[in-house]
Amino acid sequence: MDSEEFREHAHRMVDFVADYYRHIEKFPVRSQVSPGYLNDLIPAFAPQDPESFDDILADVSNIIIPGLTHWQSPSFFSYYPANSSTAGILAEILISGFNTVNFSWIASPAATELEIIVVNWLGKLLELPDSFLSGSSGLSHTATSRLTYCLFYSLGKGGGVIQGSATEGMLVTLCAARSRAISKHTPNGLVEEDVVRRLRAYTSDQTHMCLHKACKIAGIKLVVLPTTKETNYALSPALLRGAIEEGGDDVIPLYLGATLGTTSSAAVDPLLDLGEIAQEYEMWFHVDAAYGGSACICPEYRHFLDGIEKADSLNVGTHKWLLTNLDCSVLWVKNARTLTSTLSVQSEYLRNKVWIQASEAGEVVDFKDWQVSLGKRFRLALKLWLVMRLYGSSKLKNYIIHHTCLARLFERKVTEDKRFEVLVPCRFGLVCFRLKAIEASSVNALNENLLHAVNSNETTFITHTVLSGDFLLRMAVGGTLTEVKHVIKAWETIQKKATQLLSFK
Ligand code: PLP
């Protein structure tokens, strides 16, 4: 394909995507296909000869779109939002267009340096302590960029990096904590296997399963502490302390995973109190703010980050609620060297021979040493740069507040209907609610039926959770295109389905 043909196809593809968004409300929010639907529609072998772009676009319309659940529909209220934006889509065009592989500074200096700067922008918007920001030596990045850059990295201070997911952020920090513990305890006569056997990570039963996965991969035992309705499903510091003490001398407390905005109910763990315990026992303290973190750019929500100064690391999934299309998850660490000393593996063919002195003095960053994979997309560096420049922080803050107001509106509607109850106070954009039952024993079944009934309707899609044995419906507001009318329509659908269900009783 020559550049003129590409230009023509690209224009048509942009038209296609623009039309998709224009008509997105016409599609059923949740895909209506059955498992295996595509087998009969796509040949079992790849074509031998080139096919036409027209045929392919027609297939996207006719056989791919029906198999999509439309996460960008304004009536998608399931799981958590996965924001797309025009800025994010435009940035993705650039990212794919350049297709640089940014594992080291020399592999694409702009990618590395932009990532450092833009992650810092976001850190400043969140009012993170200086210790998480690059240039935390106190010198300004712009004034003496090279000097600051050198100082920051050679001192091994804090900084941020874009990971593909919260899961990867947890895995790399857990591995860094494990290495730190092995270095600390092996000189005391313990062999490495003995140290690892005694290490424990602690978390609540509301923490996202990604910490379970990270612990599985890293071979670390995870102690899961129960939460209750009384604490709104936040982790109790007293319970944590008790569990650590109970382990006695045979256990080495390693890692504490707290959450700012749990997946089930958007609970926020008390960071300050938990952080103090983590410091007392010299544990790595990680805060998973994959969902709730984006809200903390607003002064109204910043207080949820109080205590973050006690943390060793923090992740915020801007691909959830900050308009930077999947994938874009930011991880900040207070001591970057703990990551690089754990993850750095050298090989001759990757060495920077152009700026060899800068490389060997550690003056330039090689992000391959901050993540699992070698290859690295341009990702957030370009996406958040475009998002922040095209919208500005004021619009981003308004965007978050818009969603939280919509969630409050929905919560009000639920409480006004005496057949329903809100079981956990609405936080951020999430409302957890259920239909009350005449007989308590059948309340879960009733709400499960309500969920099926609501989702059988093609115009709304919500999901559920179970908290303290209660089956709850989750209304997660946060879609880029969601407006008041969509929330009202969803509520009216839920009410209508509830009326139908109750009339059968
Ligand atoms: N942490 C929380 C609180 C989440 O809600 C989620 C996903 O919903 C994750 C972590 C996992 O995120 P990722 O897909 O980026 O690993």
Image (spheres, rainbow, N blue to C red):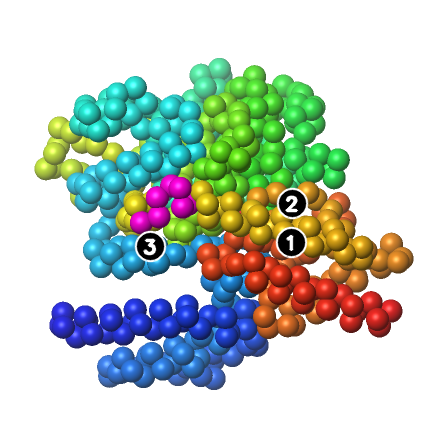
Whole-percent x, y for residue 410 in the image = 64, 54
Q: Which residues lie in the magenta part?
A: 390-396
Magenta stretch encompasses residue 28: no
Q: For this view, does 150 lie left or right of residue 446? A: left
Residue at 47% of width from left, 23% of height from top? 309
User: In the rendered structure, which amino acid carries the disc numbered 3?
Assistant: Ala
Q: Residues within 10 Å of mark 2 (few under 14, many from 20)?
A: many
- Which residue: 51% across, 62% down? 74
How far from the left and from the top, in percent, is residue 380? 33, 46
- Quarter of the figure with the N terminus: bottom left
Looking at the image, which is closer to me, 226 or 140?
A: 140
Of residue 7 and residue 191, the one placed in the foreground of this image is 7
Give the mark nearest the N terminus, 3 or 2: 3
Closer mark to the observer between disc 1 and disc 2: 1
Estimate the spatial distance between the alpha carbons at disc 3 and disc 2, rounded to whole Å.
30 Å
Q: Is residue 217 visible?
A: no
- Figure disc tally: 3
Observer able to see residue 25: yes
Dividing the picture into quadrants, the one containing residue 385 is: top left
Label 1 crowding class (10 Å Cα cut-off): few <14, some 14-19, many 20+? many
Secondary structure of residue under mark 2: strand
Residue indicated by mark 2 = 426
| Residue occupying the far right of the picture | 439
Q: Are marks 1 and 2 in contact (CB under 8 Å)?
A: yes
Which disc number belongs to residue 401? none
User: What amino acid does circle 2 point to?
Assistant: Cys
The residue carrying mark 3 is 87
| Residue furthest out toward the left | 354
Image location (x, y in percent) of residue 228: 73, 38
Query: Which residue does the numbered mark 1 point to in the structure image?
Result: 410
Vertical position of residue 456 compared to residue 360: above or below: below
